[in-house]
Image (cartoon, rainbow, N blue to C red):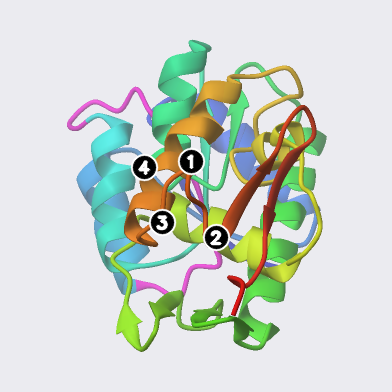
Amino acid sequence: MARVLLIEDDVRIRSAMANALADHGHDVESEASGLAGIERALGDPTDVVVLDLGLPDIDGTEVLRMIRAVRDVPVIVATARDDEREIVQLLDAGADDYLTKPFSSGQLEARIRAVLRRSATGTTTLAISVGGLTVDPRTREATLDGEVLELTRREFDLLAYLAERQGSVISKRELLSEIWRMPYGGADKTVDVHLSWLRRKLGESAAEPSYLHTVRGVGIKLTAPDP
């Protein structure tokens, strides 16, 4: 059972989702506006937020940013918008998953289970050291030679995923699926851009890599620099 907060202005959709999730054994609270949803998300011990974007007072994208600035609670965006670029932006802004309306209650409940599994894994994983790089999923902090790296949420997720699989070559398709929750065949450029930003913060480049190595035609691997 999870404590679920629904932020959805359509009373019929809100009621249907709340009843369906309650039938699955979840403890469900709901709000019809963005500001009320933010207050509830920050004040109550919520396990996961299901967030609509088309809210009457403030766009759901801003609600996501406000929640994410204060809490690391998993957020699933439930939206009628299906533009791939906007979905990527939402995931980069801190959404953990998204569902495009219309969707079934079974799909939503499965996504809730999935984000909670990922969240639980992140809280129990020990810090990982690769050369002078340390990544701690519990505190969501990464350091390089003792200096804290200023990473965005998605940059940290990318670095942690690669660090947990250090030495293994990870395809861009896998990164898109597991980190951005994008379907296979999605926007590979998204991975390239974030790798470029991450390399800059690690003090390296694609031409002169230290930690992040491209295996042409296969993917990316993270390894310790040569001594």
Q: What residue is shown with label 1?
A: 207
Magenta residues, start to end: 44-58
Residue 19 x/y as whole percent: 67, 44
Foreground: disc 4 or disc 1: 1
Q: Residue at x 66, y 59 (%)?
A: 162
Marks 1,2: beta carbons within 8 A:
no
- Tell me the tag on residue 93: 4
Tell me the CA gap for discs 1 and 2: 19 Å
Q: Amino acid at mark 3?
A: Arg
Upstream in sequence: badge 4 or badge 2: 4
Upstream in sequence: badge 4 or badge 3: 4
Q: Residue at x 33, y 70 (%)?
A: 149
**Quarter of the image with the C terminus in it:** bottom right
Q: Residue at x 61, y 72 (%)?
A: 226
Residue 169 x/y as whole percent: 79, 50
Upstream in sequence: badge 3 or badge 1: 3
Q: What residue is shown with label 2?
A: 159
User: Does 119 sit above or below residue 95?
Assistant: below
Q: What residue is shown with label 3?
A: 153
Marks 4,3: beta carbons within 8 A:
no
The local secondary structure at tag 4 comes to: loop
Tell me the CA gap for discs 3 and 2: 10 Å
Residue 140 appears in the picture as rendered = yes
Q: Amino acid at mark 1?
A: Ala
Residue 30 x/y as whole percent: 45, 49
Furthest residue toward front? 227
Tell me the CA gap for discs 4 and 2: 16 Å
Q: Residue at x 79, y 45 (%)?
A: 110
Marks 4,2: beta carbons within 8 A:
no
User: Does 220 sit above or below residue 26?
Assistant: above
